[in-house]
């Protein structure tokens, strides 16, 4: 009899307190409002009588009617709720509905989710509550909800829009033609955010932008041309309409680390660091009489250019070509760093060439032989002097 009474008391306590939901998302993060039995969008507005710290509506699943911030990451002790003023909502380790719980709201963690529970009137604590919780990849995501008293909710037509978004760019180091873009949502949106729009194009282009969209706060742009500057913009679309563009200009990782080594009067050696995804490399060399080039396989990182004329001055440049979706893109000809071996018979001249964009495009290498010419000139003069003296003597 006593055991039956204890079980009944435990059952009644469970119905009053309620338990955590079992509807964690399969990917990403979400906000769940059990009292209404619906998942609400990011930046939604709710009123106080829609969330509690007990199972207020006594639903069939006995789910606690707090506001739940949920993730596909099923880890323990994840997630943080913040008051509208930016301070953390206190965590509570006791049971839901406990008399020692903080007022007016507190948070409580479970596997893959954290509750925002209300045990008192919300007056004086209205505004935008923020939850930061990691997704299944361990990347922190931010969800925001406006919570107001019933009166405040009815009198609130939504906060004014923030004209700017916090915007950042992350350039991957693994691919020359990919950039990962991430951003933070507007601090105060005008309406519910439905999608983010991303646009991008080459910085020097006046043509149309490439446009795509996502519901995430990050996006990977692929198929970009190496060694090219791009302008990338992001803006939020809400139920009211589009916001302002937040934009930045970035440069796709520049190909460099090319070195030129002097071997002898007619040959030079070029070395470089391998470029991921390269199809082939092109070496350009020219003199005042001729221009030439040679393609080099992507399976090597050095090449020798021979058959040069020691009496001519040459300039050397190098580029890399990458294939993207069946189209080949050649990057600009980039700078070279000169190294040389010592040769007492020749003088190596290095002159920097700068194009109209201010980028070093090559080095001039010249071979000048002065000693032998000077010696020949001295001998000729001596011969002429001796001959002149002998002629004068004979005439006398």
Image (cartoon, rainbow, N blue to C red):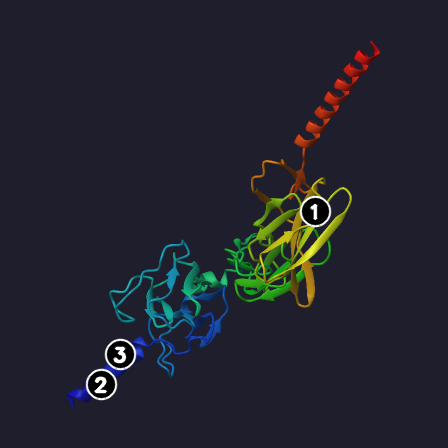
Circle nearer the N terminus (3, 1):
3
Residue marked by disc 3: 13
Residue highlighted by disc 2? 7
Q: Earlier in the sequence, mark 1 or mark 2?
A: 2
Q: Which residue is mark 1?
A: 308
For the residue carrying disc 3, how many other residues have a C-alpha within 10 Å: few (<14), some (14-19), or many (20+)?
Answer: few
Rendered location of residue 258, percent (x, y): 59, 50
Q: Is residue 195 above or below residue 336?
A: below
- Tell me the residue at 63%/52% (across/down): 304
Q: Position of residue 88 (x, y in %)?
A: 35, 57
Residue sitting nearer the eye, 53 or 276: 276
**On screen, 157 above or below 367?**
below
Horizontal side of residue 51 vs 101, given as left or right = right
Identify the image quadrant of residue 129.
bottom left
Res 344 quadrant in image: top right
Q: Residue furthest right?
A: 395
Answer whether labels 2 and 3 touch (C-beta < 8 Å).
no
Residue at 74% of width from left, 43% of height from top?
Answer: 287
Identify the disc placed on residue 27.
none
The answer to whether mark 3 and mark 1 are in CB contact below 8 A is no
Q: On the picture, is 162 further left or further right than 59?
A: right
Q: Residues within 10 Å of mark 1 (few under 14, many from 20)?
A: some
Is 344 or 73 nearer to us in this picture? Answer: 344
Q: Which secondary structure lies at badge 1?
A: loop
Nearer the observer, 223 or 372: 372
Kind of element beneath mark 3: helix
Number of residue marks: 3
């Amino acid at each position: 009899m006593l055991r039956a009474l204890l079980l009944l008391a435990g059952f009644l306590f469970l119905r009053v307190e309620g338990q955590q939901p079992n509807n964690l998302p399969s990917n990403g993060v979400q906000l769940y409002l059990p009292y209404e039995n619906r998942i609400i969008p990011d930046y939604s507005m709710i009123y106080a009588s829609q969330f509690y710290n007990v199972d207020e509506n006594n639903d069939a699943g006995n789910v606690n009617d707090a506001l739940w911030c949920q993730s596909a990451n099923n880890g323990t002790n994840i997630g943080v709720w913040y008051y509208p003023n930016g301070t953390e909502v206190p965590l509570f380790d006791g049971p839901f509905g406990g008399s020692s719980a903080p007022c007016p709201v507190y948070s409580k963690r479970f596997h893959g989710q954290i509750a925002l529970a209300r045990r008192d009137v919300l007056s004086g604590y209205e505004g935008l509550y923020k939850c930061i919780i990691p997704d299944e990849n361990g990347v922190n995501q931010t969800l925001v909800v406006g919570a107001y008293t019933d009166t405040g909710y009815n009198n609130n037509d939504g906060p004014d829009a923030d004209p700017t978004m916090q915007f950042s760019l992350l350039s991957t180091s693994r691919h020359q033609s990919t950039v990962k873009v991430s951003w933070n949502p507007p601090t105060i949106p005008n309406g519910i955010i439905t999608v983010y729009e991303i646009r991008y194009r080459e910085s020097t282009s006046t043509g149309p932008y490439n446009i795509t969209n996502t519901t995430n706060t990050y996006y990977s742009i692929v198929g970009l041309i190496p060694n090219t500057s791009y302008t990338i913009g992001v803006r939020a679309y809400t139920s009211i309409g589009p916001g302002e563009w937040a934009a930045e200009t970035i440069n796709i990782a520049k190909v460099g680390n090319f070195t030129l080594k002097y071997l002898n009067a007619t040959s030079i050696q070029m070395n470089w660091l391998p470029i991921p995804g390269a199809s082939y490399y092109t070496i350009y060399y020219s003199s005042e009489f001729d221009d030439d080039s040679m393609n080099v396989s992507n399976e090597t990182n050095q090449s020798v250019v021979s058959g040069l004329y020691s009496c001519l001055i040459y300039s050397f440049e190098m580029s890399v070509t990458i294939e993207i979706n069946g189209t080949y893109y050649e990057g600009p000809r980039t700078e070279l760093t000169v190294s040389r071996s010592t040769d007492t018979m020749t003088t190596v001249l290095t002159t920097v060439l700068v194009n109209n964009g201010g980028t070093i495009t090559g080095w001039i290498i010249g071979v000048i032989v002065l000693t032998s010419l000077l010696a020949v000139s001295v001998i000729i003069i001596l011969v002429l002097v001796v001959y002149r003296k002998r002629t004068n003597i004979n005439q006398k």
